[in-house]
Amino acid sequence: MVTCFCGNEAVLRTSWTNTNPGRMFWSCSQSVPNCGFFLWFDPPMCVRSRAIIPGLLTSRNLLQERLNTLASANRRLKKWLICSWLLFIVMFYM
């Protein structure tokens, strides 16, 4: 257990900045005001990792947005397909 300067239990967080992507650190559990406690949890990443990971995260986010767009379009097309089949059945039996 890690305690911060104010005596509370510190929380483990993850940094998503471009300089330290995915790196974990301890910080004060209070949001405002906090005591300013900060301690890295893991060792620093190599230069190559710091250069590559932001690009990978950006690519992943773009792919996730594209997936969400396609899933939405897929749901919409399924609704249209069901409606068209229902209309076809109604027209067939008339």
Image (spheres, rainbow, N blue to C red):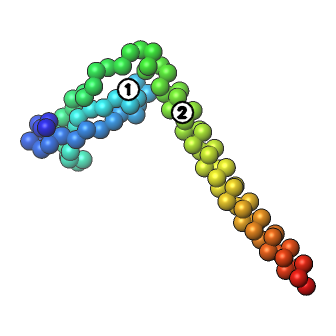
Badge 1 density bin: few <14, some 14–19, many ≥20, Cα 10 Å: some
The answer to which quarter of the image holds residue 61 is top right
Which labelled disc corresponds to residue 80?
none
Is 7 displayed left or right of 79 in the figure? left
Residue 86 in the image: x percent, y percent? 79, 74
Residue in view at x 40 percent, y 29 percent: 21
Residue 12 in the image: x percent, y percent? 25, 38
Out of 60 and 6, give the one closest to the viewer: 60
Q: Is residue 88 visible?
A: yes
Q: Secondary structure at mark 2?
A: helix
Is 49 displayed left or right of 1 in the figure? right
Seen from this angle, which residue lies furthest left? 7
Q: Distance from label 1 to label 2 (Cα)?
A: 14 Å
Which labelled disc corresponds to residue 20?
1
Residue in view at x 55 percent, y 35 percent: 60
Q: Earlier in the sequence, mark 1 or mark 2?
A: 1
Residue 47 in the image: x percent, y percent? 41, 14
Question: Which residue has dot 2 on it?
Answer: 58
Indicate the amino acid at tag 2: Thr
From the viewer's perspective, is residue 9 above or below residue 80?
Answer: above
Out of 57 and 75, give the one closest to the viewer: 75
Indicate the amino acid at tag 1: Asn
The answer to which quarter of the image holds residue 91 is bottom right
Do labels 1 and 2 touch, CB within 8 Å? no
